[in-house]
Amino acid sequence: MESFLSFWCLSSLRWPEICLSLMIFFSIHHFISQRNKPTKPWPFLGMLPQLLGNVHRLYDWSTYMLKTYGGTSTFHGPSLTNMNFISTCDPRNTEYILKVNFDNFPKGDEFCSIFSDLMGNGIFNSDSESWKKQRRMANSLVHSKAFRGFMARTTQHIVRHQLVPVLSSLARSSSSFDMQDVLLRFTFDSTCTAIFGESVNSLSKELASVPFAKAMNDAMESIMYRYVVPKSWWHLLRLLNIGKERQLANALAVINNFVSQQLKMKMKIKGCSAGMDLLSAYASVSDDEDFLRDTAVNFLVAGRDTSGAALSWFFWLLSRNPDVEKKILEEQRMILAETQRGRFDIEDLSKMVYLHASICETLRLYPVVPMGQKGVVKEDVLPSGTVVKPGTIILYNIYAMGRMEWIWGKDCLEFKPERWVDDQGRLRYENSGFRFLAFNGGPRTCVGKDMALVQMKYAAAEILLNFEIDV
């Protein structure tokens, strides 16, 4: 009778309910048995519960995981899913991936498919021969004397005639304001001027909404959403033109229209004038409108927020480290006394060693791009001993790298610009190796690195010269 009742009870349940009950039972048992041990995968669910439980502190949790497992760990997703990936902050691994065996670790199909609607086949969304060809062209144009001079003049003009006046107006009219918003607008206008030869004037005293700037924000928000949902889900949303995919489609219409208008103007004056901006330079060597559109958008995505976000962290750190700010101001006073001028020129930036070190230290602790992603072409073994197979996703964690004692010492959590300056008062360039990847590393090192540093240093110098910042 008991056997019959037991069978009857089981048969009255659906098998999914039985499986769910077993899953919950084993998961609870696993949690109890592992609660005092390092993070381990749950039965069936893998490490998804830990990920969801720490999504509000994702970077700090991933740092804890890498500390626990010695710099390289594997994330196990739920059973029957393709959510497994390898995470590393080991400089030996990053050097191997980004430089030593570069060709075996491309961006990967997943990354390219997520960004393709926005970035097309541009330099930051391509691999192999397509990337190599575009990189050679970018190096030639971005590092040319003409473009570097154009960017120096542009940065100086926007800082002096837009950024400082806007900050002065805000300081007079309100007790507090969103400094990050101002800095992001500064970066966006500077980047647009570099690419198109003209600003979209998002950095005005009214701080009004600019349709093109809003479209870029909406597009990037939609693209990031693709990272946190299954591929099949965002494909369905795109097919139905709803949700974030509809937002992306609307944003792309604005972006493509703006870039198309800029291209038409460049093609009209082609051969008649020598514009110094990137789009003019590219248009002088190519008539392919798709290529020119993708190139413009790629550079815009790469440069639109980077300096603004870094400067926001920089001023936040200075507010908590007044001794560092004092040393920067002392360095500035010495330069002004030497030049006998009341403000800085771009040429003065090379003398600002401690300011440069402070910006590098900011980027070490708060990199603008906290993680990078790579795919795998052929089976390989990383220097840490980790085996990687084709199709594996590798995340190199730049944020965690700056927080490892075995990489940066026991004071790794301290904001300490001195670690970037040697005994002779010169910058320690050896710190720019594969333990510091704020500008990536290897053949794909940020092509606009020097331009970004000039932009950040000049803006920071002028702001500190003219204002007292209280965050």
Image (cartoon, rainbow, N blue to C red):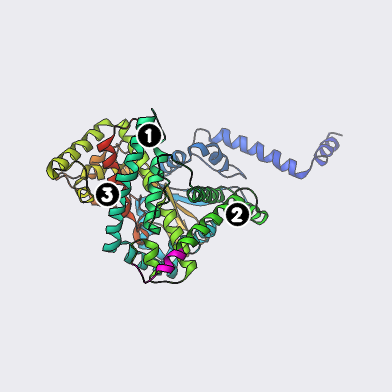
Q: Which residues are magenta?
A: 263-273
The disc labelled 2 sits on which kind of residue? Lys
Query: Which element type, helix, strand or loop, lies under badge 2?
Result: helix
Q: In 3D space, how far apart are the residues under numbered discs 3 and 1 (Cα atoms)?
A: 38 Å
471 up-or-down from 332: above or below: above
**Observer-nearest of 21 and 263:** 263
Report how far apart the C-alphas of labels 2 and 3 lie in the structure. Answer: 38 Å
Residue at image x 42%, y 59%? Answer: 381
Element type at mark 1:
helix
Disc 1 packing (10 Å; few <14; some 14–19; many ≥20): some
Task: Give the residue drawn at x 31%, y 45%.
Answer: 161
Q: Which residue is mark 3?
A: 431
> What residue is disc 2 on?
231
For label 3, count other residues whose C-alpha is less than 10 Å away and answer few (under 14), some (14-19) or many (20+).
some
Q: Determine whether label 3 and label 1 are within 8 Å by CB.
A: no
The front one of 126 and 37 is 126
Q: Position of residue 400 (x, y in %)?
A: 40, 43
Dominant SS in magenta: helix
Amino acid found under the numbered disc labelled 3: Asn
Mark 3: which secondary structure?
helix
Quadrant containing the C terminus is top left
Question: Would you say 26 lies left or right of 288 here?
Answer: right
Q: Is residue 42 visible?
A: yes
Residue, disc 1? 170
Q: Answer with mark 1 or mark 2, whichever residue precedes in sequence.
A: 1
Which residue lies most toward the right here? Answer: 1
Please identify, in this view, whether the residue under mark 3 or under mark 1 is nearer the observer: 1
The numbered mark, 3 or 1, whose residue comes first in the sequence reads 1
Residue 91 disc label: none
